[in-house]
Image (spheres, helix red, strand yellow):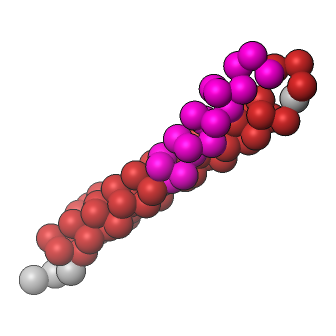
Amino acid sequence: MELKLSDQLAIERTRLANERTFLAYFRSAIVFLSSGFAIVKLEILREIEWIGYVLILIGPMLLLIGLIRFMYVKRSIRKYYN
């Protein structure tokens, strides 16, 4: 069965929204990592160095969560509309 143009456009909007969401996760992971490294490296922030290490751990986990979510939604879109 052929999809109508409005349905095809809706699917494309959903795909693009999924990519934007993944990029937001990616951007957040980069910010967490860079902030963590900055806190760890700066001598003046030695008393909150533990926060830097926590941020360094959260960054990759956030990226992994975003990647898993991206793949799940991508697979769901394909399953229902291809």
Residue 2 is drawn in which quadrant? bottom left
Whether residue 18 is in magenta: the answer is no
Residue 12 showing in the rendered view: yes
Q: Residue 38, relative to residue 33: is it above or below?
A: above
Where residue 65 appears, x then y in whole percent? 40, 52
- Residue 63 falls left or right of residue 36: left
> How many labels, in total?
0
* Magenta stretch: dominant secondary structure: helix
Q: Residue 18, relative to residue 44: is it above or below?
A: below
- Residue 38 falls left or right of residue 66: right
Whether residue 60 is in magenta: the answer is yes
Q: Look at 35% across and 66% down and name the residue there.
A: 71
The foreground one among 47 and 69 is 47
Where residue 1 appears, x then y in whole percent? 10, 83
Residue 11 showing in the rendered view: no
Residue extent of the magenta highlight: 46-63
Where residue 39 appears, x then y in whole percent? 77, 29
Q: Look at 21% across and 66% down and name the residue there.
A: 76
Q: Look at 52% across and 41% down and name the residue there.
A: 58
Residue 16 is drawn in which quadrant? bottom left
- Residue 76 falls left or right of residue 39: left
- Residue 65 falls left or right of residue 46: left
The foreground one among 25 and 20 is 25
As drawn, which residue projects farthest toward the right?
A: 43
Q: Look at 26% across and 71% down and name the residue there.
A: 75
Which quadrant would the C terminus be assigned to in this image?
Answer: bottom left
